[in-house]
Structures are given as structure tokens and as C-alpha cells.
Amino acid sequence: MLIKIAKSWEIPEIEATPEHLFLNRRALLAGAGAIGGALALPSLAAAEDPSAGLYPAKRNEAYKLDRAVTPEKVNANYNNFYEFGMSKNIVDGAAALKTRPWSVKIDGLCNAPQEIAIDDLIKRMQIEERLYRHRCVEAWSMSIPWTGFPLSKIVALADPKPEAKYLRFETFKDPKVAPGQRQVWYPWPYAEGVTVEEAKNDLAFMVTGAYGKPLLNQFGAPIRLALPWKYGFKSIKSIVRISFVAEQPKSYWEQLQSSEYGFWANVNPKVPHPRWSQATEEVIGTGNRVPTQLYNGYAEQVAGLYKDMPQDRALFF
Ligand code: MTE
């Protein structure tokens, strides 16, 4: 069991959670029935997943880590998935999400709009494993063996029109299975966005599996994003729709609190969050705190995306 003993340098959850969300936490937990959930790897047995035979996928050795992979048991019991509760322990709640049948709609300003069943998509894209760092805006981090395919393959499949400047992603919306979505004053469904250029960067990864098997529900099954140079909230889970759009999309967090959670959200240890420092991060499961790196250590791959932009706080929030 992951027992978190607060150290003097740790951020109490109340400081790392937007206040209005924190104040509603109790109501949400009550609604979710999520109090005291069990520590477990999830109910959806990976073997039942129709794509299970494609795992483990070959590792792409170009993506290496400077630290140990976070143990699966630790990662699988420490998740942000607000559709299922405000705590990190959403594993039981997320088990209710049915991930088959599931399809992803690709639409908007593109020449090949389509809706693809998840298993057809996974078979069509050659999946590979990559070791990525994951840095949450709450100043903690993990390291994960994700399996999936580059987001650039979705861009190629959709064939965007020249007017398309951004991709907008949307999570499922089903308040019957996701108690958090019964809180109607939040801007559900969860949404996120990137520029077309960011989407074409090789690091941007559509994730369908982790730890050598299909994604567990709490990780955002059956398909999520991983943008390791950005704060974790950009890495949207359980995606049902990807739209090519001309205007910068407003994300879920931007709608809630734009002064704290902006569109770009690139990791920068020198730009503090308005309520806490981003200089260091707690490496979950280790008890260690380490310095945070610019672009979460991926500057070489992504800094060029932003070289002509004002390097002000907005780029990092
Ligand atoms: N996507 C959806 N749909 N709902 C969420 O609550 N949380 C985000 C992101 N994607 C979230 C989401 C946040 S704040 C983080 S840090 C990561 O997912 C957490 O991913 P993990 O649980 O795999 O660590």
C-alpha cells in the first residue's frame, strides 16, 4: 500500500488543488462512494481486452530514462481522473468505465473525417513501447513504460486542411458511470488542446497501453495522450473525439481557472505556479525529491517549437 507520510517540504493536497475543487471534494467523494477504495490492480483483466495479444510491444530504445520506472502498483493506485473522484484513489470508481465498444471520432477541418473503432485503430497503427517521464502540475512525477503510437499518425490519417491550427481532444461524457460528471457546474467533458505543430512532434504520443499490457482504466483506457514536456493535465484520458480547429481550444482547466492552468503548460522549474514552487518534484514511490528540468528534460526535442514565441510565463502556464 502506498502510504504517504507528509514531509515538511510536501505540498498538502489542499494547496495543490484549486480551492473551489477542494471545497467540493467531500460532496464528490460521497457521490462517488469512493471513500476507502481498495488498493488493487483493476477489475478489468487485461487478458479480456481484445487488443491484449498485441502486448508487450517492442520498446523503442530512443526513449530512455535517467531514473527507475515507477512500480506499476504504485502508479496504478495514485491517479488523477476527476471524472471518478478528487482523490488519487479512483481505481474502484474507474472500474465502472466500459471501454468496449469504444470509438474515436476524428472531425473538424480535415480532409478525412472518420470514426474509428478502437481495436481497428490500434491494429492499424504499429504500437511501440517508450519510457517517458510524467510531471504533474502538483509537483510530483513518475516514470512510465507507455505503449502506443505517435500522435503525428493521427494527423496524417486525418489530413488536416491548411486552416487547421489546433487539435482539440475530448474525453467521454457519461455521468451515469462517472460520478464527478454529475457535478454539473464543472465544464465536462474534460477537454484539451495542442497546436498541429506540437501534435506532429515525435514526443507527442497516443497511449493505448502501459507496463506491457492494455491501459488500465485508471490510466485513461482505452486511449489517452502523453505529452511528457507539459504538465500532466494536458495528457487527457479516455479520448472519444479529436477535432481539427482554427481557434485555440479552451481546456477544462483553463475554463475553471485560467490564471493557474493555461493552454501551453510547458514544464519550467523557474516559473512557479501561483500557489507553489515548480523548482522540484516528489518522485512518487521513492520518497525522493529531485530538481525539475526545463520542458521536463525534453528541451532538445521540443524547445524549437517555441523559439519564436515570447518566453514569458504564459508559455509555462
Ligand atoms: N484526463 C481526464 N479526462 N480527466 C482527468 O481528471 N487528469 C489529468 C490528466 N488527464 C485528468 C486527465 C492530470 S491532472 C494528470 S496529472 C494526469 O492525467 C494523470 O495521469 P495518471 O493518473 O496516469 O498519472
Image (cartoon, helix red, strand yellow):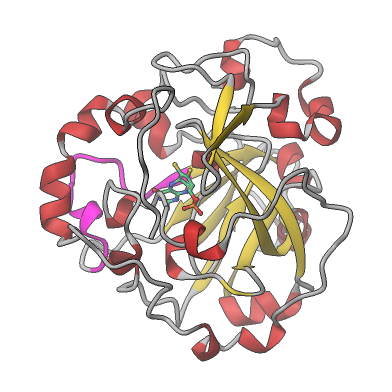
Is residue 201 in view?
yes
Q: Which residue is at the front of the view, 32 or 110? A: 32
Furthest toward the right, the residue is 62
Residue at the (13%, 44%) spot, across then down:
26
Q: Main secondary structure of the magenta part?
A: loop
Question: In the rendering, at what x and y percent does residue 240 appear?
Answer: 48, 63
Relative placement, left or right, of 290 versus 182 is: right
Report if residue 190 lies within the magenta region.
Answer: yes
* Residue 78 % position (x, y): 42, 53
With respect to residue 297, does 94 lie above or below? Answer: below
Residue nearer the viewer, 143 or 258: 143
Residue 49 coordinates in the image, percent (x, y): 53, 86
Q: Would you place residue 219 above or below residue 180 in this image?
A: below
Q: Which of 41 and 216 is in front in this view?
A: 41
Q: Which residue is at 66% across, 42% downward?
A: 228
Q: Quadrant of the C terminus?
A: top right
**Residue 238 visible somewhere in the drawing:** no
Q: Determine whether, in the image, residue 198 is placed left or right of residue 96.
A: right
Q: Position of residue 302 (x, y in %)?
A: 79, 33
Q: Is residue 49 toward the left or the right of residue 138 in the image? A: right
Q: Where is 148 relative to 184, above or below?
A: below
Say whether residue 283 is left or right of residue 256: right
Magenta part of the chain? 177-191
